[in-house]
Image: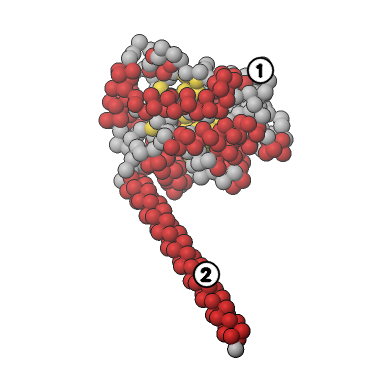
Amino acid sequence: MRKRFNVLGTSITCLLFIGLMLGLFFLGNRTQKEQTKVATTSSSQEISARDKVIANYLDQMTLEEKVGQMIFARMPSAGQTGALETYHFGGYILFASDFEGKTLEQVKEEIASYQSLSKVPLLMASDEEGGTVTRISQLLETPFASPLELYQAGGIEAILSDAKQKTSLLKEEGIYAGFFPVADLSTDPSSFIYDRTIGQDAKTTSEYIGQLVKLLKQEQFTSTLKHFPGYGDNADSHTDLVYDNRSLEELRGNDFLPFRAGIEAGADSIMVSHNIVPAIDDVPSSISPEINKILRNELGFEGVIMTDDFDMQGLVQFVDQDTGALQTIQAGTDMILSSSYASQIPYIIEQVKAGTITEGRIDQSVKRILGMKYDLGLIK
């Protein structure tokens, strides 16, 4: 009899234990679901807030203002006030002449005056890769070093530390874009682009790009991956038409990888080169629909696609400024880096009114541009 009671007691204990464990499991599962629900709701609310701000801005903009947002303007050293009031630029890039003979405080005051003229806050930019490509360094005791120099001195950590200091200084001035990082690959010191890369293979460069994009996101500073689809060891399109005769398979297996890493890390924008890649298209990449399809459909990029400088010979020798502007928008580009805005903007507006491109197509780009500005804290 005692043995029977012992067996019964053991069975009851086991059942109680199983019941307790099941209860804890379902409670934990419920708690996890509730936490997921809260996180999802919070995320949805944030997305809704972002979309609402974008929609509010877009609803109040004229066609002229929308087209203006698609221009990243290069302006002469005089006449900025009239141009800003007339053309409603989305961005304004400063060059070396904008810093010459000035103090950091004077540059900051000038930028603030430009912003005061803009209905939609400008994305102020300056080429600040470091090394041979830096504008603000002329006002500093110690110029910003290139990524190559930094990598050779202290690896990726040295680049990240430098980037944190650089973005802090630029944001203090009112500059929220530095047109970096360079995601191009080159291991040949004689190559045009080598000194602007870290001189490493695709694996190491991808790691560097991914980490730097994440840092820039934390700092609320624009990341611009350039120059898609990758320069490699080709010639300089600043001075001539450049043909890149590599296969698409080679580009996918090598040059695309740092761009993919940057996209996965949350890159804000990608700058497209003027190089002609016959394996992809027979026109400069900056006006190629096929290049944009690769970025959007294959690599999954949802941010802002911008051109390299429209004044570069790699494009100038191929197409005129106005036609090129139309073609790049038709290709799917969001922003045009240009000094020919005075003819391009009216021409694009005319093409919209003529039905060559739709206002809906313009809206697609403006939404991305406004979204980037929202993420940077420039619009609220």
* Residue at 71% in and 30% down: 245
Examine the rendered structure and indicate whether residue 97 appears above or below residue 346.
Answer: above
Residue type highlighted by circle 1: Pro
Between the C-alphas of marks 2 and 1, the distance is 64 Å
Q: Position of residue 63 (x, y in %)?
A: 37, 42
In the rendered structure, the answer to whether residue 115 lies left or right of residue 70 reads: left
In front of the other: 368 or 161: 161
The answer to whether residue 324 shows anywhere in this view is no
Q: Quadrant of the C terminus?
A: top left
Of residues 150 and 356, the one nearer the viewer is: 150
Q: Quadrant of residue 218?
A: top left
Tag 2 near tag 1, CB within 8 Å = no
Q: Amino acid at mark 2?
A: Met
Residue at image mark 1? 189
Residue position marked by numbered label 2 in the rendering: 21
Q: Residue at x 47, y 64 (%)?
A: 28
| Viewer-side residue, 289 vs 378 | 378
Callout 1 secondary element = loop
**Please, which residue is most extreme toward the bottom here?**
1
Residue at image x 60%, y 29%? Answer: 184
Q: Earlier in the sequence, mark 2 or mark 1?
A: 2
Percent position (x, y) of residue 152? 59, 20
- From the top left corner, tell me how far across and down residue 155 is, in percent: 57, 25
Q: Can residue 63 be seen by looking at this rendering?
A: yes
Q: In what quadrant of the picture does the N terminus appear?
A: bottom right
Front label number (2 vs 1): 2
Q: Secondary structure at mark 2?
A: helix
Image point 42% across, 56% down: which residue?
39
Residue 130 position (above or below residue 31): above
Residue 212 bears which disc, if any? none
Q: For mark 1, does the 10 Å Cα neighbourhood hold few (<14), some (14 to 19), or many (20 or more) residues?
A: few
